[in-house]
Image (tube, grey):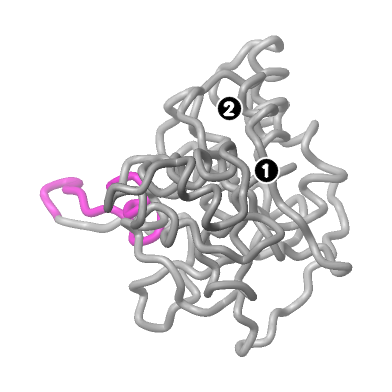
Amino acid sequence: MGFKAREHSIPASDPRLAPAYTPTDAARYLRMPQETLRTWVHGRSYVASGQSTRSPALIQLDDPDQKYLSFINFVEAHVLAAMRRRHGVKLPKVRSALDYLRKQFKSSRPLIDETFQTDGLDLFVERYGEMINVSREGQRAMKDLITAYLQRIDRDPLGLPVRLYPFTRDTEAISCRKDDPRVIVMNPAVSFGRPTIAGTGIPVSAIFERYRAGDSIAELAEDFRLNIGDIEEAIRCEAA
């Protein structure tokens, strides 16, 4: 069974496609190892049958120079992280899963396709769970985790991502993922997509730099007219 994807081309001038994050910065905001993300966006070299070869990237960078992730690339990595985080799945199986998504949703970018979230998640989790030998109980946990990640994405009327609320906690517990506050937001139309305090446009980097310089959390809350919880989330995000 296939699904009719609502895929729309994004104009090249759209800020969501602009080079915005180095793999190092993106990995920090995604709270994942840098080398893992580099493998996702650049592929990986290995030796097979005595010859050096390179596996293709899982995420195709929008940057013509292939150096930076766009906001759309960042969202793709965010969703891909949900698929791999709990089971340590090998890359060939992840690649097979993405090929399955492309076929089912007839979409070149299935990780950001709204159809995946609204119509096909159950089918995907069942198929992916079989692929990596996850029990029914494990598949339910996988669905809950992926859903928690998908719910961090705000979309425009066409179903394309416009904002992402990154996780600011390291815990892998699904219940904690669901409760992770939506204080920090990444919006390509604000501060070049860098994390800011939601609803204010205040860059978390500005708060963190003053914190590192010695300002107390209470002082920062007063100066930026934020509550202490917001300041703590900003520090937690930037210090990852």
Label 1 neighbour load within 10 Å: few <14, some 14-19, many 20+: some
Q: How many marks?
A: 2
Name the one closer to the observer, 103 or 153: 153
Q: Is residue 126 above or below residue 8?
A: above
Q: Earlier in the sequence, mark 2 or mark 1?
A: 2
What residue do we see at 33% from left, 73% from top?
67
What residue do we see at 51% from left, 22% from top?
172
User: Judging from the image, what secondary structure is the residue with disc 2 in?
Assistant: helix
Q: Quadrant of residue 69?
A: bottom left
x, y (%) of residue 167? 56, 40
What residue did someone put label 2 on? 131
What residue do we see at 62% from left, 43% from top?
227
Name the one closer to the observer, 191 or 129: 191
Tell me if residue 38 is in the magenta stretch: yes
Q: CA distance from mark 2 to mark 1?
A: 33 Å
What residue did someone put label 1 on? 182
Q: Please identify the quadrant where the C terminus is shown.
A: top left
User: Judging from the image, what secondary structure is the residue with disc 1 in?
Assistant: loop
What residue do we see at 46% from left, 55% from top?
58
Name the one closer to the observer, 187 or 160: 187
